[in-house]
Image (cartoon, rainbow, N blue to C red):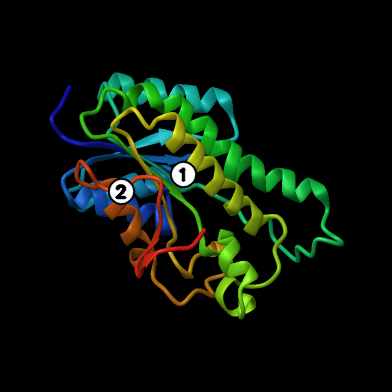
Amino acid sequence: MSDKKIALVTGANKGIGYEIAAGLCALGWSVGVGAREQTRRDAAVARLRDAGLDAFGVPLDVTDDRTVAAAADLIAERAGRLDALVNNAGITGGGPQQPSSVDPAVIRTVVETNVIGVIRVTNAMLPLLGRSASPRIVNMSSSVGSLARQSGPGGETSTGPVAVAYAPSKSFLNAVTLQYVRELADTNILINCACPGFVATDLNGFRGVRTPQQGAATAIRLATLPDGGPTGGFFEDAGVVPW
């Protein structure tokens, strides 16, 4: 196995995911660019390689068992282990998402990607993470999943409009993250949630006020935590996000 650190970032062909991949590559890591669509995936990998960075494509649909298993096999063959998994792939489900009128199918679709997809990928990669000296898992959450912020004053300002599919999917993801922390407490895997802030991406019609590079910073920090760093936390640039 190579001494170079190996990471997999899901949904890494554009936006925040791409910048997480680029940031880890810039630190000397070899990074798997996980993405469903081949053309965009290949373009992202080519862009990183043209910049002299060590990136490789990983065909991956987080909702599909077959591609997730194949992704684990690809990384096992290429590197023999995984040092960091960044579960970044996610969808909003579109809008509006008023709870009284939403189509339940929208909620199912969002949860399938944002929660079950994370579980599917994480479970497939755990054996590879177990071969790392300092394994890290970062789940890309959002402050919209903070129940404290949702229920506090100024919820509309701090967590955006009502979104009964997207916001609860992030609360669900936070809860799932803590279950992994509890199960793996006796291992050296550090597992945390990251909030990128309101980033201008196609996920929100580029209405965000932060750049993808800014949104990637917390995830990169959590993916490269030193041994003994925090686990079971929810972080943004400014510090800890309340659950």
Closer mark to the observer between disc 2 and disc 1: 2
Dot 2 or dot 1: first in sequence order is: 1
The quarter in which the N terminus is drawn is top left
Nearer-the-camera pick, 128 or 187: 187
The percent position of residue 206, horizontal first and vertical second, equals 52, 71
* Horizontal relation, residue 121 to residue 84: left or right: right
Q: Which structural element holds mark 2?
A: loop
* Horizontal relation, residue 174 to residue 57: left or right: right
Q: Which structural element holds mark 1?
A: helix
Q: Which residue is mark 1?
A: 39
Residue type at mark 2 is Pro
**Could you tell me which residue is drawn at 49 percent across and 65 percent down?**
201
Residue type at mark 1 is Thr
Quick check: can you spot residue 37? no
Q: Farthest residue toward the right?
A: 101
Which image quarter: residue 168? bottom right
Residue 89 higher or lower than 4, as above or below? below
The percent position of residue 87, horizontal first and vertical second, equals 45, 43
Which image quarter: residue 14? bottom left
Residue 105 higher or lower than 73, as above or below? below
The percent position of residue 85, horizontal first and vertical second, equals 37, 38
**Could you tell me which residue is drawn at 42 percent across and 49 percent down?**
13
Nearer-the-camera pick, 24 or 230: 230
Nearer-the-camera pick, 93 or 169: 169
Q: Could you tell me how many numbered marks the image carries?
A: 2
Q: Farthest residue toward the left?
A: 3
* Horizontal relation, residue 193 to residue 63: left or right: left
Q: Which residue is mark 2?
A: 230
**Could you tell me which residue is drawn at 75 percent across and 50 percent down?**
106
Residue 83 higher or lower than 70, as above or below? below
